[in-house]
Image: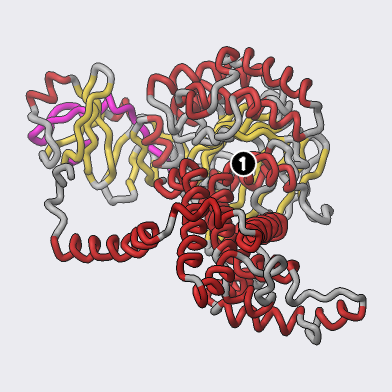
Amino acid sequence: MSRAPLGRAPLRLVLPALVALGFLILPLLTLLQRTPWSTIPARLVEPKILDALRLSLLTATIAIALCLLLGLPLAWMLARVDFAGRSFVRILVTVPLVLPPVVAGVALLTAFGRNGILGGPLRELGITIPFTTTAVVIAHTFVAMPFFVISVEGALRAANQEYDVVAATLGADRWTIFRRVTLPIALPGVLAGVVLGWARSLGEFGATITFAGNFPGTTQTMPLAVYEALQVDFDAALMLSAILLLVSVAVLALLRERWLGQAAQ
Amino acid sequence: MNRPASASAFLDADIVVRRSGHIVNIALTAEPGDVVAVIGPNGAGKSTLLRALAGLLPLDEGAISCAGDTWDGPATKTPWTPQERNIGMVFGQHLLFPHLDALDNVAFGPRSRGAGRGESRRTAHRWLETIGVADLARRKPHELSGGQAQRVAIARALATDPTLLLLDEPMAALDVGVAMALRFELARHLAEFGGVSILVTHDAIDTMTVANRVVVLDEGAIAQVGTPLEVAQRPRTEHVARLVGINVLRGHSTGTDVRLVDGSGLVSTTPFNGQVFASFQPAAVALTLDEPTGSARNRWPGTVRSVVAHGAAVRVHIDAGAALIADVTPASAAELSLVPGRQVWAAVKATEVTVYGTGADNSEAPLPSRHV
């Protein structure tokens, strides 16, 4: 620690900080320590685990793609368009953020369930959503979208809006401004939103099991598989958890330049 | 309030914008080739004027027409957007797009206005050459110095071939030396530019070297218009007087006696009846420690507020009821031990005082606000 010009950091702040750090790291270390690494290669090719892993990666990726497609325009509207009721809309976007995921799952059932307001008519057309892979994607998108929108809106707000003004005086219409100025300048923030949303989606449990169920191959994602394994085979649960942890850390490492660089600014 | 826009002027703007208690009400006209400097204190409405011209601020009343097009006015259903107005804008901070290199920054305008990629880049390259920074075409903004970046920003604004160029304190963020070099380049480019340039500035030198017309704003209205020389010699606001560095006092003149607003008196050699400005050069102000007894008939006791080097002289700001500026030699500054707080007498000979009407009540025509 270099000499601090304002004096040493006081112990009454340093000690709780160290406790917090230890509290966050210790369980992860014990998880890694208890994981039976030697059996991983053999376990990894088990179809059930492979299915769960593949389903998790697939649904999380589709969910974040939907966030980009729909959430990015919503974030832009909140950050750049002065419409009536904007702060109310922002609150609406934030509600799913604080909603317990199980409640989100129940809510999704009321909308897309067999007798739901959208699910009913869809069933007439022969489309059933609950307890399918589509339901997993919907659940993931529902919980990831608020994270994505709020973080991207922050990034768009932080970007100097005068650049938009400059572009307008140069003759660019709003779509061109968005595409060639706003988005490229806010790109690190958008990528941070993608990572946040993707990670949130990868770990999603409550809404998924409520709305999509726990069917191996179609709706059983990694967290659900961990939960199931926990009942019968603790080693398997450990291993699946370790894999999820490694995937999360890998994503973080891949984007650390962009993400941490942005956060440090 | 709604004066009809005359069809004759190239740029004819009559701008009324109300913002939380303030009213900005400015009418100005200009012809192709005009470089109009807009000066005035903070909050005088300079930025409001530029933003209204650019279409970034809606007019509450008034009209803007340029090059035969009516951009905004009572007959216009919706004001033209900034994109539709053929403008170029240069900001105090260069505001180059950080993710594009210099060439693509300059090519952005032509591209947005419909030119192809190759054609836009050729146009951009031509402008970078004109402005003397073609060798920096592939540099990102963060790899450019402040002066280089502002040159690129000027090229970017000119590359769309605008009819109206708006410059918002383009030299404000630059070092003095860099600003000086860029100023003369800018003067040359603006002289070659075929449209109207509106230059908002805080700098008296900008006004003198770059502009052929000056508009002085004060509290949202035009306080004075004229050539740079007219405004410098006969400023009508304290702000401009400070800006060009001369003393200007307001008062009421009867014959050669001027009763100043602070109650003190002043004698000139130019008879005038009515509201006047009395001005004199800082070098005409003599400073003494004791009350002067010589021929100088105008004298005030005061307190030294600041003492700074000014060229070969020493510039002294004195609080003598009114704020006075005096230029003295370094030798006499040392002899008088001029430091802030020092009590001195300031004296000016009657022959050094120029008196001119405020135009508020008589003798001179009302402010020619329509003619810029």
Where's the C terminus of chain B, which quadrant?
top right
Image position of B102 with respect to A98: above or below: above
- Which percent across, then down, holds residue A223? 55, 68
Q: Nearer the viewer, residue A252 or B355?
A: A252
Q: How many marks?
A: 1
Q: Is residue B300 in sight in this rendering?
A: yes
Is A235 a magenta residue?
Answer: no
Residue ID at (50%, 65%): A236
Residue ID at (57%, 55%): A44
Element marked by disc 1: helix
Q: Nearer the viewer, residue B112 or B304?
A: B112
Does residue B278 appear left or right of residue B166 in this picture?
left
Q: How is the image coloured?
A: secondary structure
The residue where tag 1 is placed is A184
Residue ID at (51%, 51%): A158
Where's the N terminus of chain B, which quadrant?
bottom right
Does residue B54 appear left or right of residue B211 in this picture?
right
- Which percent across, then down, holds residue B324? 27, 37
**Kind of residue indicated by mark 1:** Pro
Q: Which residues are magenta?
A: B275-302
- Which percent across, then down, holds residue B281? 33, 27
Q: Residue furthest right?
A: A125
Q: Nearer the viewer, residue B43 or B318?
A: B43
Residue A20 quadrant: bottom left
- Which percent across, then down, holds residue B235? 45, 35
